[in-house]
Amino acid sequence: MSKTLFDKIWEKHIVRQIDGGPSVLYVDKHFIHEVTSPQAFNGLNKRGIRVFRPQQTVATADHNVPTLNQHLPIKEELSRKQVEALIKNCAEHGVELYGLGHPFQGIVHVIGPELGITQPGMTIVCGDSHTSTHGAFGCIAFGIGTSEVEMVLATQCLLQTKPKLMRINVEGELNKGVVSKDIVLYILSKISASGATGHAVEFAGSAIRSLSMEARMTICNMSIEMGARCGLVAPDETTFNYIKERKFAPQGEAWDKAMAHWKTLYSDGNAKFDKEIFLKAEDIEPMITYGTNPGMGIGVNDNIPTTETINETDRSGLSKSLAYMGLKEGTPIKGQKVDYVFIGSCTNSRIEDLRMVASFVKGKKKADDVEVWVVPGSKQVEKQAKEEGIDKVFEEAGFILRQPGCSACLGMNEDKIPSGKYCISTSNRNFEGRQGPGARTMLASPLTAAAAAITGKVVDVRELIESYEPETVINN
Amino acid sequence: MSKALNKIKSTAVPLNIENVDTDQIIPARFLKATDREGFGKNLFRDWRFINDDENQPKQDFALNNKAYSGRILIAGKNFGCGSSREHAAWAIKDYGFDVVVSSFFADIFKNNALNNFLLPITVSENFLQKMFHAVEADPTTEIEVNLEKQTIAFGNDSETFEINSYKKTCLLNGFDDIDYLLNIKSEIEEFETLEKQS
């Protein structure tokens, strides 16, 4: 019988099927961080039980850490206590922690792949909705709540109902200046912020296949923004080449055995999906959001929709969104003044993102009245950026290269955008107040963000494109 | 105190907004606690107060409208989208709600709610709109939820709702998923052994 990629992985991880209820799903890898794990450890301690399989959980500190002066004690008391609780909990339960100061520290969805922990065919969970990122390797990877973190710590299992399956096919070649972030913002603008709720989404088609691993991660990362339970891309040579030789990748015989399994991980020719969507790569322009959910995106040359032109899903929220954003319906977004540019987050903070920005920015200076923060996804990304001289390019352009963490993506630490200010952000959410109370977020690709940093406004990056190197985006 | 839920009869608070994300339910800056209690006071913080000031409530926000009260929150479709933070469910429960009604819930929020004995009830869009109208027209309108029978009713209107039988049993009896999983630990160990051999 033909099976989807999702089915193949799901079936291999079912411990038990409850009649009329969920499945008991086995979890291969569990990532934890300081914000959504303390209550789970408290729960274990109250029950007097230990972490069941500590070697299958990896911890880092990312959501609530400062991105300057990380060698100093954390100033803010509550944040410091949260990070200290993580250190204590990991030590007591024998969980590996890549905390502040560790060379592997970083955003949880950046470090998993870069260390080779994330591998095809796995089930991966974390108390963070962007766990969907890991699906780029052909995994079932999804975000969970803290009660579920406790379940995984206690039993390495979760009770899960099998989602429906959707496949989104993007065929053809991307236009110049259009990158993976634009693809996913385009998909979101087509299907809305709830368009994939209840579904696992497989991304397929020639435009997806041509993307590097990091670009695929950007797309899977934002599958949660469509409401999807998870996003997946079938593993291929690009995937295998990326994993090979990484710190925790299988070696020698184990590698051959793993490869034999990984090569079976694809959706069979006539596998059935509950829903299938077909999009053309050449229809995609550099995208930007104008509203307060990630589905409210348009091409940079388009006008902000009106109550008449907008899709039905976002109609009722349009005026509230635009009032918050200080934007007018039916007007161009191009030319909109920008105050802050944030390049970072688990969506776009990897070395390719930083290279892409650097290749565009080299020799240019930021606009005077724009503040630009670049926050690398991990210590390893930071190190590599310095080795490649990317830090110097940023310095000369007037960008501030900070230290790894989630930073202004969610404004949990002190990296907040002031009320009323406009921020072009490479992150994943433009919700009201997401980057700080009153902050106005416009989501875009690293290239579009870099172009805004140089010009101080929303522009079509293609008009400034001469110094950008597309091969850093679409490799292989 | 038993966590179990079954029959709930209460007035409701109508939050007639769609796509309510968990950043609105509980903004990230309130996620720094290491326990589960006390999140209710910051529920919908930035929609409730001007300039984050508890002395300046936004009068037009439903939770600040003294006419509305009760254990049931009614919200527009796609409720609880975005971040997986369980703090959102904790905040709603801690504020005093036992039921959230919407025409559509985001997946992670729904699981988090169920794990905290906060019952998410999915109704048809038509029924949801009728409920909004009824409660907005008369805030003393009582809504009756019967989990055993899977019904929700007000006035002369009623609808049945879906919930899987496993979860229903948990909620009716106050059982946790974690208890269930701990009870089948030997089966999980057997599964691991078989997987290693394959």
Image (cartoon, coloured by chain):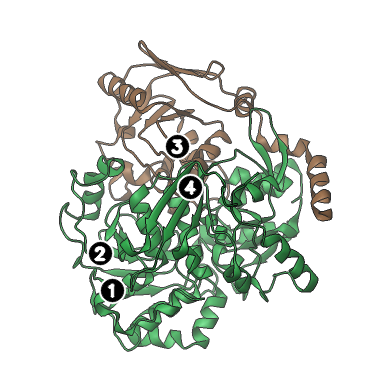
Chain colours: A green, B brown
Instruction: Report helix, strand or loop for mark 2.
Output: loop
Disc on the earlier residue, 2 or 1: 2
Q: How busy is the neighbourhood of tag 3: few (under 14 within 10 Å), some, or many (20 plus)?
A: many
Q: Amino acid at mark 1?
A: Val
- In this rendering, the answer to whether A103 lies above or below A435 is below
Q: Is residue A435 visible?
A: no
**Residues at marks 2 and 3 on the same chain:** no
Q: Nearer the viewer, residue B89 or A164?
A: A164
**Residues at marks 4 and 2 on the same chain:** yes
Say whether marks 1 and 4 touch (CB < 8 Å).
Answer: no
Residue A150 lies, in percent from the top left, at: 66, 46
> Which is in the foreground here, disc 2 or disc 3?
2
Residue A428 lies, in percent from the top left, at: 41, 58
Q: Residue at x 44, y 74 (%)?
A: A473
> Which is in the foreground here, disc 4 or disc 3?
4
Look at mark 4 in the image and give the residue it sits on.
A228
Residue A446 lies, in percent from the top left, at: 38, 71
Q: Is residue A396 visible?
A: yes
Q: Residue at x 42, y 35 (%)?
A: B104
Look at mark 3 in the image and give the residue it sits on.
B105
